[in-house]
Amino acid sequence: MQIQTKTMGTVEIDDAQKILFPEGLFGFEDMKEFALLDSETKPFYYLQSIQESQLAFLIVDPFIFCQDYEVDIPDSNLAKIRIESPNEILIFSIITAPKDGGEITANLQGPVIINKKARMAMQVISDDPRWTTKHSLLPKNQKEAAC
């Protein structure tokens, strides 16, 4: 299947790249069909809407830059996307990279949880006060960790 993307023009995707968000994403509840696409810049990916070509999110595995990151997700939420085993879970954070060159941040408070087996996903909200919607990806100085 070919889709139009915000950053890469027309791309070919297969069924394994399609992700269904039954409840959409926060602020985009009507957008339910996305594709998980590799970014040219590793370790980032794009979560590209299949329904709206101009809607794409830059995402990253939060554990890459924040080794002590954790999120407690109620089983009732995981059941909505048919999670049966922890092995089926992928967790991503949505990245904000301001056009003006400002600080690059990750939303650790609202991670995207993907069931890689069922290709279903949801965004959840963590009530852990350590995580914010604007968590810096880069350390404040070279000796500090980002988390």
Image (spheres, helix red, strand yellow):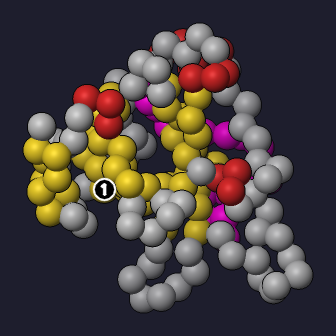
* Whether residue 10 is visible: yes
Tell which residue pokes out farthest to the right in this image: 143
Residue at 76%, 69% (x, y): give it: 146
In-front residue for pair 118/20: 118
- Compared to residue 119, the image places residue 106 above or below, namely below
In the image, the segment drawn in magenta is 120-136
* Whether residue 95 is visible: no
Where on the picture, by quarter, is residue 126?
top right
x, y percentage for residue 73? 67, 27
x, y percentage for residue 6? 21, 62
Quick check: is 134 in the magenta stretch?
A: yes
Q: Amino acid at mark 1?
A: Ala
- Compared to residue 98, the image places residue 33 above or below, namely above
Tell me: 34 left or right of 102: left
Q: Residues within 10 Å of mark 1 (few under 14, many from 20)?
A: many
Tell me: 55 left or right of 27: left
Tell me: 3 left or right of 67: left
- How many labels were placed on the picture? 1
Quick check: is 42 in the magenta stretch?
A: no
Where on the picture, by quarter, is residue 99?
bottom left
Where on the picture, by quarter, is residue 8?
bottom left
- Compared to residue 122, the image places residue 96 above or below, namely below
What secondary structure predominates along the stretch shown in magenta?
Answer: loop
Position of the C terminus by quadrant: bottom right
Residue at 58%, 80% (x, y): give it: 103
Residue at 68%, 56% (x, y): give it: 64
Residue at 77%, 82% (x, y): give it: 140
In-front residue for pair 146/18: 18
**Label 1 SS:** strand
Which residue is denoted by mark 1 in the rendering?
56
- Compared to residue 107, the image places residue 110 above or below, namely above
